[in-house]
Image (cartoon, rainbow, N blue to C red):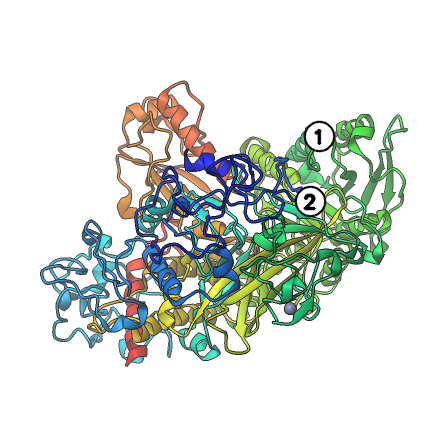
Amino acid sequence: MSQQGYVAAPPYSQAQAGMGGYSAGFGNPPPQSHYGAYGSPPQGYSAPPTGVLKPPASSSSGMPPPPVSSQYGANIQQNGAHPHSFPPPVASAPSMSPYGQPPQSAFYSMAQAPPPTQQLTNQMSAMNIGGYGTLDVGVFYTHALSAAPQQYHTSPPPAMGHPPLSPPGQQLSSFGSPPPMATMGSVAAPPMGMSGPPGPGVHQPPLGPQGYPQQPGFFGRPQMAGPQSGAFPGGFPGGPAQMAGPPQKKLDPDSIPSTTHVIEDDQAKRGGQVYVTNIRGQVPPLVTTDFTVQDQGNASPRFMRCTTYSFPSTADLAKQCKVPLAAIIKPFATVPKNETPLYIVNHGETGPIRCNRCKAYMCPYMQFMDGGRRYQCGFCSCVNEVPVQYFQHLDHMGRRMDLYERPELSLGSYEFIATLDYCKNNKPPNPPAYIFMIDVSYNNIKSGLVKLICEELKTLLDRLPQEEGAETSPIKVGFVTYNKILHFYNVKSALAQPQMMVVSDVAEMFVPLLDGFLVNFQESRAVVNNLLDQIPDMFADTNESETVFAPVIQAGVEALKAAECSGKLFIFHSSIPTAEAPGKLKNRDDRKLVGTEKEKTLFQPLRGVYEQLTKDCVAQGCCVDLFLFPNQYVDIATVGDVPSHTGGSIYKYSNFQVEVNGQQFVSDLRRDVEKSIGFDAIMRVRTGTGFRATDFFGAVYMNNTTDVEMAAVDCDKAVTVEFKHDDTLSEESGAVMQCALLYTTIGGQRRLRIHNLSLNCSSQLSELYKSCETDALINFFAKSAYRAMLNQPLKTVREILVNQTAHMLACYRKHCASPSAASQLILPDAMKVFPVYMNSLLKTPTLVGSTELSTDDRAFHRLLVNAMGVEETQVLLYPRLIPLHTMDVSSDAIPAPVRCSEERLSESGIFLLENGLSMFLWLGQACPPDLIQNLFNVPSLGHLSSEGMSLPVLDNAHSRKIHSIISSISQQRATSMKLLIVKQKDRSEMLFRQHLVEDKGLHGGASYMDFLCYVHREIRQLLT
Ligand SMILES: [Zn+2]
């Protein structure tokens, strides 16, 4: 049986022999003392379990656990399409784990301290996860080595003293060839490598013109001062050629850690496998890896990812390493079809069982005792009475007999039905409403946008989200058009014609009609379609170019208030709101501020009206989605403020033309309207003793320090949560966290979505570094930097980022790596590509600070990143560059990406680049004419005009293949990307080149190589 098949079946389905999620050791004493590491060959599912199956129970094919019933009670429903029961997940055997994990008890690993051997194994597993799987100290070495990886880490971490030095004759990582000690000396000596003893002089970077001037105290050490060209303030000098003293040697770019290799290696090692979440502190596969998750007590990495899966045990250690401790939580993440949807638990009128003291919800980390009459909270250690109706006997292992019948006792993620206590005013909520608010000023009419929106809505309204199994959507819809004044429409089904009501007093916004404004589309279809037909004509002759904005949002909130429901406003807006009204804005795009102390003000939203609006929206559960169609500056920092605090999305289509951007906009709108979403949400992250959530980043609103309020939360929105110690953590109990999200479903049901995750704790920093996740780290750094820039000069923010990078790596070097020459750059294996991501972050339009960049673009980018999950920030900061000229048209696969550098382009090539927001097709000057013919139906590149090129769909293998690649990429992304075709050496090529993140930035910022050298030198400074 294939692994896919194995997982595609619900893990709790009882009727399938040999299937099921939990290893048979669940509860049995582990029959083996050896725990396989990830690196060990996976043991196939086909291997029949031997000798550890539980005694057969009710079903001949399933193997339920001890004496309990194998079905969930009537109080359990499944939140999804599979109407399966929830029988015990026991039929699997120890060897079933794809990673060769032994039948170790999930219960054991989560609820109790793992035995030393298990910890060791976990540690070793973690070690092996990183790319090359060889070095416990992550010594940085060349690819030549990866062909013959060495297993160094045969001893456990504290034994770091055993240097993982290369055997004689084995060159680990010479930086360039020949060994460039002397030539590299001018910058930082060989920044990496273990190739022999450092030559004379390498420890002392000579002064010279290749220094890092201008930044007293931080980027620039005084002794390194010197001229530099083309670098932004705080930047780095030019290309590699500048780095080496005479004689100049070109450094081998292949010798520095490669993101594409790390991604490929993880895919090769863990791709296509089942990731079982039964081990505390287990590091999941990379976000780029294709894997299947089976929940066995910890939330899927789709819902929660952490910067490290082993927290330092004390605040001092955390301070020492400066590695941020954070979780990136995507509570509504899309679950692939072959994974089990969340189960829904109903504890009846009494509501979910919670700890009396810390209010944590019942979960696998609660420890039952006293014959089942009491339980100890895994978060605050409070001992609670088990409510009578929830009582259950314990088995000889001290576990509840109904463990496998109850998702809340055995799974990482599940939902509870909330009682009226969890509803506003103790009343069940109404289903939410969607209000479409269309700017009908001159520009939008002229561009054809209004007509496009109205046409699209006619079909889109049939595709509003529905409850599972329902025929129609419970969501009501309403319509507003506006310019300087607002027009509301009565579309009650009884009317023959829609009725318009105008509100021209925008200072005191009110909703002129209640009955007939929000309607069920199915019932009012005729009137609504009639309205949508009329709107473009009604305003066809408009000359009005001024608009209001804040009153539009105000009108939406008031309408939802009147209807006593939550909902979403879809605002289609084009210009800076200059009409006389609350929230009126003026152009404050002053590029002279760029690079000054006041640059931050460009990104600070104007407060006042907008701040109050945000509060009103959040209180009402009113999410604001903003579709912008600007021809010039619209002050995105301000108009995007309400959306970015209400769980809303912002889309931008500059200089909108129906023919050019129409399709992209329509795709975005469709996806946005249809996507899975919860309303009026409030999230709380609880933690075990010793640490707590201290900061939150996302499209959220914080009224106090603990409650994360979101007017709505959809499948793309992620909240990044930072943790701090307030006491010593216990290595035995680890670090547990529980994210509880209270929200209203589209059907108007109040629910609690719970995600639990357990991490390890250690007094050894090496554990932390081994369990780091670079992609999660960079998500945290991006969001925290983008927030910091509102209050600090960008230069300071950039300096902090670089400083922290150097500090984290220096600490590793000092405390975890084996002794080695100072000339070597030593990176933790799990963080070896961290510098390339960090450097890319520093070069993002938002942080780079160039007067050439549009302020709105920078503000837009800032708000987007703020709501992103790990997957989105990963590809944004390291785009995929895919060679297409060598693709195999007979294969379904997307060709392997290459490194994001100009060096990887070839004149005779064609490349596709995507970062989740933009997509480019780059055509080399000498790309083969037959390929051009196949893709564009013209005989050569010269026949393609440089402007407005599009990619036709043609009937040949190459054309089909490339369209299939593009569509497959598009499906993976949250927003639709418009394909931009650029020819090598054309002016538009600049747009493409700014995404080659390993190169020197077009608007400033160092190349990857330079950055690495610079960081290396900083590390050496810190260590001396
Ligand atoms: Zn508690």
| Cα separation between marks 1 and 2 | 36 Å
Residue 213 image-quadrant placement = bottom left
Coordinates of residue 300 in the picture (x, y in percent)? 52, 51
Residue type at the position of mark 1: Asp
Coordinates of residue 126 in the picture (x, y in percent)? 37, 59
Residue 241 image-quadrant placement = bottom left
From this view, report whether residue 878 is shown above or below residue 953.
below
Left-right relation of 561 to 689: right
Element type where label 1 sits in the image: helix
Coordinates of residue 201 in the picture (x, y in percent)? 15, 75
Element type where label 2 sits in the image: loop
User: Could you say which disc has been placed on residue 73 in the image?
Assistant: 2
User: Could you say which disc has been placed on residue 462 in the image?
Assistant: 1
Q: Residues within 10 Å of mark 2 (few under 14, many from 20)?
A: some
Residue at 29 percent across and 69 percent down: it is 1016
Residue type at the position of mark 2: Gly
Coordinates of residue 732 in the picture (x, y in percent)? 47, 70
